[in-house]
Amino acid sequence: MIAQIQRQRTSKGRRAFTMIELLVVIMIIAVLAALVSQVASGAARQSKRKKAQGQIQALQEGLEQYKLEYGNYPRPVGGSLDPIDQAKMLYQALSGDGTNMIDGVQPTASTGEVGKDGKVILDALFAGSKKSSFVHEDFYVMDPWRQPYNYVRGDENNQTFNKTTFDIWTEATPRPDQEEDEDTWISNWQ
């Protein structure tokens, strides 16, 4: 009888996978996919953090050049603490495109024409003749998470980490409504 069953299996061709075998294979694939996605998301997160560190360094160097050119670091109109106002002011100060966000300067709006209202200080804001991923379509500098960079000019009235210069940082998160965790911030004072 067993020999007859054996012959029937071989005479029909290959034996099919059992349901348990299929489930085991699917589970192995799912575990491997989860591991790969964890590694990939960690690498992407690290890549964005490195990019933000480089952008902050470029902004810092650009602001030092701005001070050499104009005698002081720029300040947003009215001392605004709104991150978008600060990021627009940084864009204008370093690109020469508009001045209406910079305190103490004759106001003109940004139009996308680099250098029309002042000296282009930070070429990293542009890739050739086009804006880079560093610049939002509304003319402000943004981090790799597409959030505006925060900036406060240091002086006797501000509680900044860099009393004589400025603080610039990103909260390193894709959403501004997320819980703030200063340990994850990327800044020029760390």
Image (cartoon, grey):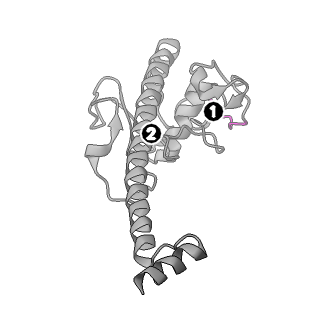
Q: Nearer the viewer, residue 59 or 52?
A: 52
Furthest residue toward top? 68
Which residue type does callout 1 highlight? Ser
Q: Nearer the viewer, residue 140 or 101?
A: 140
Furthest residue toward bottom? 1
Q: Is residue 120 left or right of residue 57?
A: right
Q: Is residue 133 above or below residue 180?
A: above
The nearer-to-camera label among 1 and 2 is 2
Which residue type does callout 2 highlight? Lys
Residue beneath the point at 41% across and 41% down: 43
Q: Residues within 10 Å of mark 1 (few under 14, many from 20)?
A: some
Q: Is residue 72 above or below residue 140?
A: above
The span shown in magenta is 106-111
Locate residue 108, reporting x and y percent. Answer: 68, 34
Locate residue 44, reporting x and y percent. Answer: 44, 43
Q: Is residue 47 magenta?
A: no
Check disc 1 and report the residue beneath it.
132
Magenta stretch secondary structure, dominant: loop
Locate residue 52, reporting x and y percent. Answer: 44, 35
Q: Quadrant of the C terminus?
A: top left
Q: Is residue 166 left or right of residue 118?
A: left
